[in-house]
C-alpha cells in the first residue's frame, strides 16, 4: 500500500517536471516530437499496419485456429504453449514488435490460451523484424550488411532460448483445453485425425465469428488504426522524454553511471550512451551503437546493438503493456524475459562473432536474394517478409508433422 500511495504523487511530480521542461525548451520539444512522428510515419506505419490488418483477418477466417491444430505437436512439448503460438511466433518474428503481443492478446480474448500460456507466448514472440535488423541496423546504422547474419543469429536465437526457458513459467497453472480441442483430442491421435481437427477448428472459428468479408475488413482496419495510433503516440512521447532528459542533464548522469558499470564488466564505457538511449527507445539506441567511436571494437558495438534490439526499449514495453491491459496477462514476466533476452543476445553475439565473421558466412549471407530484399526498398522488403513468413510456417508445419509421426510410431511400438 505504501508503494502505491507514493507511486501516484511521484508520477505526478515527474510529469509536472516534464511539463516545466517543455515550457523551458519548446524548440527542442517540438523537434523531438517531429522526429518521433517521422519514425512512426516512415518506418512503423508502413511496416506494422499491413500485418495488423492481415492478422485480424486471419483470426476472423479461422486460419490461426487451423495452424494451431497443426502445430500443436511441435509447440506443446517445446514451449508449453498451444499450436496457435507457432503462428504468433512466425508473425512476431517477421513483422516485429508489438505484433506478437497483439496476436497473443487476441488469442487470450478468445480463450485459446491460459494466462500462463499467454505470458510465455508474448515473452518470446516480441522481437525486432528482419527489415529493421538487416536494413536499418546493419546497413543504415553500421554501414555493414555482413553484420546481418550474426545479429540475426544472436537476436532470434536468444528469443528461442527465452521461449524454452519460459516453458517452465507458470507450470503450476492448470491448462484448460479450448472446448473444440478437448472435444476432438481423441480423434487427433488417430490417422488423419490431426488434419480433420485442424479443418473443423477453422470451420468452427469462422462460424463463431460470423462476419462477412466486408465487415471483417472494416473491423480489422478500425482496430489496427487504433493500435497503430497508440504505437505512434508512445514513440513520440518517449522521443520527447529523452530530449527533455538530455536537456536537463539527466541523461549525462546516466551515461556516467552506466559507463562505470561497463568499465567494471570489461566493456568499453563509451557504449554507455548507446545503452542508456536504447533503454528508452530502440531506434535511437541502435543508431548510437552504430555511430559509437571507431576505436571501440566492432564486436562490442554489435553486442550493444543486440542487447538493445532484444530489450526493445521502454517505448516498446509501453506498447506491449497497453496491449496486454485488460487481458489478465501480467507485465512483470514480460519485463524479466526482455532483460534475459537482451543479455543472452549480447553474449551470443560475442560467442558467435569469430565463428561467423571469420568463416565468410556473413558476406555470403548478405549476398543472398532474401537478405538483399529485406535491406532494399519498402516494396521488395515487404514482399521478402511475406516470403519469410511462408518459409517459417512451412518449416514449422514440416517439423510438427515429423514430431506427430514419431509420436505415433512410438505409440505403436509400445502396443503389445
Image: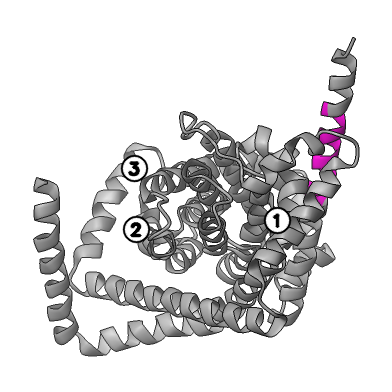
Residue 258, position as x, y percentages in the image: 30, 50
Local SS, label 1: helix
User: Which label is found at residue 262?
Assistant: none
The C terminus: image quadrant: top right
Q: Residues within 10 Å of mark 1 (few under 14, many from 20)?
A: many
Judge whether residue 364 is colored magenta: no
Q: Is residue 117 left or right of residue 198?
A: left
Quarter of the rendering containing residue 391: bottom right
Q: Residue at x 43, y 57 (%)?
A: 327
Q: Residue at x 33, y 75 (%)?
A: 237
Local SS, label 3: helix
Residue 342, position as x, y percentages in the image: 48, 47
Q: Residues within 10 Å of mark 3 (few under 14, many from 20)?
A: some
**Residue numbers of the magenta segment:** 395-407
**In this figure, which residue is indicated by the disc labeled 3?**
263
- Is 344 above or below relative to 290? above
Instruction: Quote the CA–CA distance across marks 2 and 1.
Output: 41 Å
Nearest the viewer among 167 and 33 is 167
Q: Is residue 280 left or right of residue 174?
A: left
Nearest the viewer among 321 and 341 is 321
Q: Nearer the viewer, mark 1 or mark 3?
A: 1
Residue 407, position as x, y percentages in the image: 82, 27
Residue 334, position as x, y percentages in the image: 43, 48
Q: Residues within 10 Å of mark 2 (few under 14, many from 20)?
A: many
**In this figure, which residue is indicated by the disc labeled 1?**
65
Which color scheme is applied? one colour
Amino acid at each position: 500500500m505504501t508503494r502505491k500511495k507514493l507511486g501516484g504523487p511521484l508520477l505526478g511530480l515527474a510529469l509536472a517536471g516534464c511539463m516545466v521542461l517543455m515550457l523551458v525548451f519548446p524548440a527542442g520539444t517540438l523537434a523531438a516530437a517531429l522526429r518521433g512522428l517521422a519514425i512512426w510515419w516512415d518506418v512503423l506505419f508502413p511496416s506494422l499496419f499491413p500485418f495488423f490488418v492481415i492478422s485480424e483477418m486471419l483470426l476472423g477466417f479461422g486460419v490461426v485456429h487451423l495452424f494451431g491444430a497443426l502445430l500443436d505437436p511441435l509447440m506443446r512439448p517445446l514451449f508449453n504453449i498451444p499450436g496457435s503460438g507457432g503462428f504468433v511466433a512466425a508473425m512476431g518474428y517477421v513483422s516485429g514488435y508489438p505484433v506478437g503481443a497483439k496476436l497473443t492478446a487476441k488469442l487470450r480474448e478468445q480463450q485459446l490460451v491460459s494466462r500462463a500460456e499467454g505470458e510465455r507466448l508474448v515473452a518470446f514472440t516480441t522481437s525486432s523484424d528482419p527489415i529493421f535488423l538487416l536494413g536499418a541496423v546493419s546497413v543504415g546504422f553500421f554501414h555493414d550488411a555482413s553484420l546481418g547474419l550474426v545479429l540475426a543469429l544472436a537476436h532470434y536465437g536468444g528469443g528461442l532460448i527465452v521461449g524454452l526457458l519460459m516453458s517452465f513459467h507458470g507450470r503450476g497453472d492448470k491448462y484448460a483445453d479450448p472446448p473444440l480441442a478437448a472435444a476432438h483430442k481423441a480423434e487427433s491421435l488417430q490417422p488423419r485425425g490431426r488434419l480433420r481437427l485442424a479443418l473443423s477448428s477453422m470451420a468452427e472459428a469462422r462460424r463463431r465469428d460470423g462476419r462477412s468479408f466486408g465487415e471483417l475488413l472494416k473491423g480489422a482496419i478500425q482496430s489496427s488504426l487504433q493500435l497503430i495510433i497508440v504505437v505512434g503516440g508512445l514513440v513520440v512521447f518517449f522521443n520527447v522524454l529523452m530530449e527533455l532528459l538530455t536537456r536537463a542533464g539527466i541523461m549525462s548522469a546516466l551515461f556516467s553511471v552506466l559507463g562505470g558499470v561497463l568499465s567494471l564488466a570489461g566493456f568499453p564505457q563509451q557504449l554507455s550512451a548507446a545503452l542508456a538511449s536504447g533503454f528508452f527507445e530502440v531506434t535511437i539506441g541502435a543508431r548510437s551503437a552504430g555511430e559509437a567511436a571507431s576505436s571501440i571494437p566492432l564486436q562490442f558495438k554489435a553486442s550493444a546493438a543486440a542487447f538493445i534490439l532484444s530489450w526493445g526499449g521502454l517505448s516498446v514495453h509501453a506498447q506491449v503493456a497497453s496491449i496486454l491491459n485488460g487481458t489478465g496477462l501480467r507485465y512483470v514476466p514480460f519485463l524479466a524475459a526482455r532483460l534475459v533476452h537482451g543479455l543472452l543476445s549480447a553474449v551470443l553475439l560475442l560467442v558467435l562473432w569469430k565463428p561467423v565473421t571469420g568463416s565468410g558466412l556473413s558476406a555470403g549471407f548478405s549476398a543472398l536474394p532474401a537478405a538483399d530484399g529485406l535491406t532494399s526498398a519498402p516494396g521488395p522488403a515487404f514482399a521478402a517478409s511475406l516470403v519469410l513468413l511462408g518459409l517459417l510456417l512451412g518449416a514449422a508445419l514440416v517439423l510438427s508433422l515429423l514430431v506427430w509421426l514419431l509420436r505415433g510410431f512410438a505409440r505403436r511400438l509400445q502396443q503389445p
